[in-house]
C-alpha cells in the first residue's frame, strides 16, 4: 500500500513555533515598545495550558492507579522516582558549584554592595519567605477535595489524584462505572490539549517579543560570561550526565530530544516547562511508558526534579559572591548547598521559581549578600529558558528510566517513537 504523503513543513507545530520565536525576537529587538505590548499573548497561552493541566494529571494518575493489579506498586514507583530525583538534583547543585569555581564568572567585577538597587529584588525576597519547609508540606493538602482541581498547585492535584485512584481501586465492582467514565473522559481532554497547542506559536511570539523588547539583547553582553557558563554547563549536563543515564537504560537522549522537539521549542518560547506538560505526558505514553508511571513521575518531577534550576542556583550564588568580593569558606559552601537542596523543593507552583528560590537560599546563608541578586536580575529572564529546557529534558529522561525500572516500558514502542525511520519496513 502506498504511504500517505507527509504534511508540508509549515504544518508542523515545531516549525511554526520556531518561526514565531525568530519573529518575536526580531520584533522585540527592532520595535521594543511593540514587543513589550505582546506580553498578553504569552501570558494568555500559559494560562490556557495551566487550565488543562489539572484534569490531565488527575485523569492520567487515577486511570493508571485504578488499573494497577497491585496497589503496592504505587508506593514503589513514587519511592524510586524520589530516589532518582534526590540523587540527580544534588548532582546538579554540585556541578553548578564546581563550574563556578572553575570558570569564576564574577571574578574581577569588584561590585560595591551598597551601590546596588536593593529595592529591585525586594519583591522576590518577600515571596521567598513563603518557601519554608513547613509551609510547603502544608501546601500539598488542599482546602477541599475539589479545591485541588481548580487551583494551580501541581502537587495538590497529584496528592488528590493518588488518594482518589487508590480509593477507586478499592471500590470493586461499584467503582468500575466511575473508572470507565474517567477513562472515557481522557479522550476529549487530550483532544482539547491538541486544540490549545494550535495557539502555541502566538504564545511563543508574545513571550519572546516581550522578553527581548523589555530587557534588550544588549543586557546579555554585560553578563555574557555568566549566561554563557550557565548555558554550556546545562548543555553538558544534558549530553553527558543525562546522556550517560539514557545510554545505560538503552536509549539515546539526543533521539529523545528530537522526539520532543515541538515541546522543547514551546518551552524555549514561553520560558515555562509547564506549557508543555500535557503534551509531554501524552508523548511519553505514546513512547511506551506506562500510564501510571507517567502520571506519577512527570508531575512529581516538575516539583522535585529541577536540574536546570539547581545548576543555576549554586552557579548564580557563587557568581554574586565573586562579584562582590565575598569570601566563602568550605563550611559556607556546604551550608549553601544544604539550604539549596531544601529551598529548591519548596518552589513548586511559584511563578519565577528559580529567582525566588535563589532569594530564599541567600536569605538563609547571609554570607552571600541578597542585594547582589540585582546584578543578575536583567539576564535572569534569558537564563530562565535554559532552566526550563533542562528541567523538561531531565523529567522526560527520569520518566523513561523509572518506567524501565518498573518493567512498564514497551521498548518496541520507544524504538518506534525515537527512531521512526528505522521502524519503517523497507518497500524495496
Image (spheres, grey):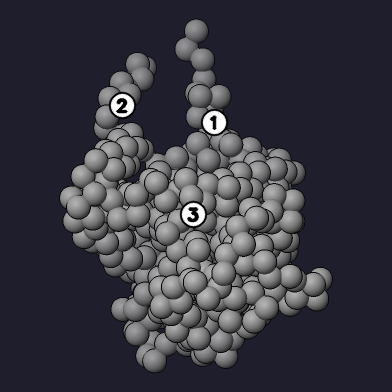
Which type of secondary structure does the marked residue at label 2 adopt?
helix
Residue 176's spot in the image, x, y percent?
41, 73
The residue wearing badge 2 is 9
Badge 1 or badge 3: first in the primary sequence: 3
Residue 228's spot in the image, x, y percent?
56, 45
Categorize mark 1 by other alpha carbons within 10 Å: few (<14), some (14-19), many (20+): some
Residue 78, visible in the rendered structure: yes
Q: Nearer the viewer, mark 3 or mark 2?
A: 3
| In the depicted structure, whether residue 399 falls above or below residue 61 | above
Residue 231's spot in the image, x, y percent?
56, 47
Badge 3 or badge 2: first in the primary sequence: 2
The residue wearing badge 3 is 383
The residue wearing badge 1 is 419
Q: What's the residue at 32%, 24% (across, down)?
A: 6
Q: What's the residue at 57%, 90% (across, down)?
A: 134
Q: What is the spatial separation of the Cα atoms under label 2 and label 1, in whole angstroms?
A: 19 Å
> Pointer 2 and pointer 1: residues touching (CB < 8 Å)?
no
Is residue 324 rendered to the left or right of residue 221? right
Residue 141's spot in the image, x, y percent?
47, 87
Q: What is the spatial separation of the Cα atoms under label 3 and label 2, in whole angstroms?
A: 30 Å
Which type of secondary structure does the marked residue at label 1 adopt?
loop
| In the depicted structure, whether residue 237 falls above or below residue 326 | above
Amino acid at each position: 500500500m502506498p504511504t500517505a504523503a507527509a504534511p508540508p513543513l509549515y504544518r508542523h507545530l515545531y516549525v511554526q513555533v520556531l518561526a514565531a520565536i525568530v519573529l518575536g525576537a526580531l520584533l522585540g529587538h527592532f520595535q521594543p515598545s511593540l514587543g513589550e505590548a505582546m506580553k498578553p499573548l504569552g501570558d494568555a497561552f500559559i494560562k490556557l495550558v495551566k487550565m488543562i493541566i489539572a484534569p490531565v494529571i488527575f485523569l492520567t494518575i487515577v486511570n493508571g492507579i485504578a488499573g494497577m493489579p497491585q496497589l503496592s506498586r504505587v508506593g514503589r514507583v513514587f519511592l524510586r522516582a524520589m530516589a532518582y530525583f534526590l540523587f540527580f538534583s544534588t548532582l546538579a547543585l554540585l556541578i553548578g558549584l564546581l563550574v563556578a569555581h572553575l570558570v569564576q564568572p564574577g571574578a574581577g567585577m569588584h561590585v560595591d554592595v551598597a551601590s546596588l538597587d536593593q529595592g529591585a529584588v525586594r519583591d522576590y525576597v518577600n515571596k521567598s519567605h513563603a518557601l519554608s519547609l513547613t509551609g510547603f508540606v502544608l501546601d500539598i493538602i488542599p482546602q477541599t477535595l475539589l479545591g485541588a482541581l481548580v487551583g494551580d498547585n501541581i502537587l495538590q492535584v497529584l496528592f488528590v489524584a493518588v488518594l482518589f485512584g487508590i480509593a477507586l481501586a478499592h471500590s470493586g465492582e461499584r467503582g468500575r462505572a466511575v473508572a470507565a467514565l474517567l477513562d472515557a473522559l481522557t479522550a476529549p481532554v487530550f483532544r482539547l490539549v491538541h486544540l490549545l497547542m494550535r495557539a502555541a506559536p502566538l504564545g511563543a511570539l508574545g513571550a519572546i517579543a516581550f522578553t527581548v523588547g523589555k530587557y534588550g539583547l544588549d543586557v546579555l553582553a554585560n553578563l555574557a560570561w555568566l549566561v554563557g557558563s550557565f548555558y554550556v554547563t546545562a548543555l553538558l549536563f544534558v549530553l553527558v550526565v543525562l546522556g550517560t543515564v539514557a545510554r545505560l537504560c538503552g536509549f539515546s537522549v539526543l533521539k529523545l530530544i528530537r522526539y520532543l522537539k515541538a515541546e522543547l521549542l514551546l518551552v524555549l518560547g514561553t520560558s515555562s516547562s509547564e506549557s508543555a506538560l500535557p503534551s509531554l505526558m501524552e508523548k511519553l505514553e505514546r513512547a511506551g511508558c506506562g500510564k501510571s508511571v507517567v502520571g506519577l513521575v512527570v508531575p512529581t518531577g516538575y516539583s522535585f526534579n529541577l536540574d536546570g534550576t539547581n545548576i543555576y542556583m549554586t552557579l548564580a550564588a557563587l557568581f554574586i559572591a565573586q562579584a562582590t568580593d565575598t569570601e566563602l569558606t568550605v563550611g559556607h559552601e556546604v551550608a549553601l548547598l544544604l539550604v539549596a537542596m531544601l529551598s529548591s523543593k519548596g518552589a513548586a507552583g511559584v511563578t519565577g521559581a528559580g529567582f525566588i528560590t535563589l532569594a530564599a537560599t541567600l536569605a538563609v546563608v547571609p554570607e552571600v549578600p541578597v542585594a547582589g541578586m540585582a546584578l543578575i536580575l536583567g539576564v535572569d529572564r534569558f537564563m530562565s529558558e535554559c532552566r526550563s529546557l533542562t528541567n523538561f529534558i531531565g523529567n522526560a529522561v527520569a520518566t523513561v528510566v523509572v518506567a524501565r525500572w518498573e518493567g512498564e516500558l514497551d521498548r518496541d514502542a520507544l524504538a518506534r517513537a525515537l527512531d521512526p525511520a528505522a521502524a519503517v519496513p523497507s518497500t524495496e
